DNA sequence: CAATACTTGACTAACTTGGTCGAGATTCTA
DNA sequence: TAGAATCTCGACCAAGTTAGTCAAGTATTG
């Protein structure tokens, strides 16, 4: 279970916007530079995040992006499921209901699906428990530990 | 979170071998037919499962495959992690230890990794709780519900 | 008007996935 | 011992996905 590059970049970008959350807008260029993301690629991603209702944009010379909602209101599960596609696939065919007339391969697939459904629930459970705000706090902690670098001098 | 076709076929094949677990050996051809898996592709997969220590093979005219261990001793997590690659990626760089001298993109990736690590643990947790034997039982249940098909006659 | 920044969609190179194929090695049976 | 059945090994291939680039356009500000 690994995020695609696209997915990781998306969360990184939202993290930056989350940290700087406010009425002002932040330029693609700055996010790209700070997070070391290819600029043109990030354009695509932010555009996509806009369609997904995660960010707003402003065009023109003082343009840029900001979050559409506050970081507390954005679940990591939403972001990732939007960018990477739904984790909880809605197939659920032959699960829990009538399992009649299944060929033996279908029966096997069905048995496997049973546990994969649990796996997906577990994933979503973890991701739903984390907001963008939580991630921002975590980032602050990590950066906090950088503010007091170990003193190796005598 | 979805199994690759390869992964699903692998579990299906092991399920068949699990159901028929015993000293005798089962032919690729039969597994392929029963589970509707492309024969040549299944050859690859079973060969791979052999390298992974999941199955034994016998060559020659009465050849075939059987499980290397009993179904109770095979965890679903082992199978899937072997076929699909490790879920619990061992990177864990910058996790829990010294987070000094991280560039801001590294700090962000680190924060993200923190929660992805939880996700992976959750996945492995579910998969470790299921043995091949459990899956076989589940399959029996599903097939059991086929033995008494609904009677639509008057 | 010029500069800046987002917008849109086409394009591409590299990689992965799902699968096929041929030739060989091994083993059983007649 | 020949031949048939079966696994073994590695090359090959088509289609799809991923990561990323590019060009031309639109909107906004100074």
Image (cartoon, coloured by chain):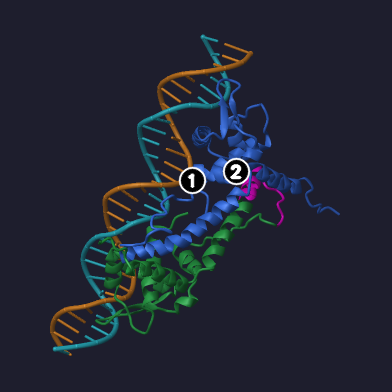
Chain colours: A blue, B green, C cyan, D orange
Q: Which of marks 1 and 2 is nearer the N terminus?
A: 2
Quarter of the image for residue B6 reads bottom left
Task: Please report the residue visible at 51 percent of the width from the left and 35 percent of the height from the top.
Answer: A52
Image spot of residue A15 (x, y percent): 63, 40
Q: Give the range drawn in magenta.
A: B97-112
Residue B123 lies left or right of residue B103; in this view the side is left
User: On what subunit does the disc labeled 1 rest?
Assistant: A
Task: Please report the residue visible at 52 percent of the width from the left and 65 percent of the height from the top.
Answer: B127
In the picture shown, does residue B25 fall above or below A120?
A: below
Q: How crowded is mark 1: few (under 14 residues within 10 Å), some or many (20 or more)?
A: some
Image spot of residue B45 (x, y percent): 36, 67
Label annotation for residue A84: 1
Q: Which sits in the foreground, B126 or B89?
A: B126
Image spot of residue A68 (x, y percent): 59, 32
Q: Is any part of residue B103 visible from this angle?
A: no
In the picture shown, does residue A142 fall above or below A63?
A: below
Q: How far apart are marks 1 and 2 (CA)?
A: 14 Å
Label annotation for residue A116: none
Residue B122 lies left or right of residue A91; in this view the side is right
Q: Is any part of residue B99 visible from this angle?
A: yes
- Confirm whether the magenta stretch covers residue B103: yes
Q: Give the secondary structure at mark 1.
A: helix
């Amino acid at each position: 279970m690994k995020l695609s590059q696209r997915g990781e970049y998306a969360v990184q970008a939202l993290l930056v916007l989350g940290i700087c959350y406010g009425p002002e807008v932040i330029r693609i260029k700055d996010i790209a530079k700070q997070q070391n993301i290819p600029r043109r690629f990030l354009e695509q991603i932010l555009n996509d995040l806009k369609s997904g209702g995660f960010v707003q944009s402003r065009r023109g010379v003082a343009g840029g992006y900001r979050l559409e909602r506050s970081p507390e209101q954005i679940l990591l599960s939403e972001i990732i499921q939007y960018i990477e596609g739904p984790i909880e696939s809605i197939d659920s065919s032959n699960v829990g209901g009538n399992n009649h007339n299944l060929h033996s391969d279908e029966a096997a697939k069905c048995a496997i699906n049973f546990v994969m459904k649990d796996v997906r629930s577990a994933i979503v459970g973890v991701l739903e428990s984390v907001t963008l705000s939580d991630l921002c706090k975590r980032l602050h902690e990590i950066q906090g530990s950088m503010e007091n670098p170990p003193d190796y001098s005598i």
